[in-house]
């Protein structure tokens, strides 16, 4: 099972927010870390369902944490973030 890295941030007076360096534009939020982690799994699956219809590209592959650590954009975005591995199970597409 693949895992996507999520960056979880929390500002004062706000909920927890999660974003995915490998899946640009996909975000979610929750009142607790547990809630945002559950929603992170759900939003990844939801985004993958029609990603190619909306973007014209395949759903991005997940990079390892070691690959991400070498990415300067990730280094900056992960400052003050909780880094979490979110399990991702792609739904099978039925043959027509």
Image: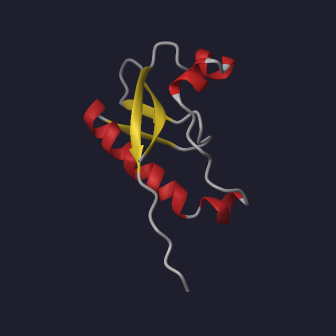
Q: Nearer the viewer, residue 30 or 84?
A: 84
Q: Which residue, as the protein is rendered here, is positioned at the far right?
A: 56
- Residue 34 is situated, as x and y percent measured from the top left of the image, at 26, 35
Q: How is the image coloured?
A: secondary structure
Q: Residue at x 52, y 55 (%)?
A: 47
Q: Quadrant of the C terminus?
A: bottom right
Identify whether 55 is placed above or below 94: above
Q: Residue at x 40, y 39 (%)?
A: 86
Q: Residue at x 57, y 34 (%)?
A: 63
82 sits left or right of 68 in the view? left
9 sits left or right of 47 in the view? left
Q: Residue at x 44, y 63 (%)?
A: 91
Q: Tally the marks.
A: 0
Q: Which residue, as the protein is rendered here, is positioned at the far bottom?
A: 96
- Residue 84 is situated, as x and y percent measured from the top left of the image, at 40, 29
Rendered image quadrant of residue 55: bottom right
Identify whether 50 is placed above or below 75: below
16 sits left or right of 61 in the view? left
- Residue 69 is situated, as x and y percent measured from the top left of the image, at 58, 18
- Residue 9 is situated, as x and y percent measured from the top left of the image, at 43, 24
Residue 32 seen = no
Residue 3 seen = yes
Identify whether 68 is placed above or below 23: above
15 sits left or right of 45 in the view? left
Q: Nearer the viewer, residue 2 or 27?
A: 2
Q: Nearer the viewer, residue 71 or 28?
A: 71
Rendered image quadrant of residue 15: top left
């Amino acid at each position: 099972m693949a895992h996507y890295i999520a960056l979880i941030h929390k500002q004062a007076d706000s909920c927890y927010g999660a974003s995915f360096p490998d899946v640009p534009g996909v975000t979610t939020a929750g009142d607790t870390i547990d809630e945002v982690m559950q929603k992170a799994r759900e939003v990844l699956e939801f985004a993958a369902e029609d990603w190619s219809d909306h973007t014209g590209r395949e759903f991005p592959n997940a990079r390892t944490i070691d690959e991400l650590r070498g990415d300067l954009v990730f280094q900056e975005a992960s400052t003050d973030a909780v880094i979490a591995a979110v399990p991702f199970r792609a739904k099978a597409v039925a043959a027509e």
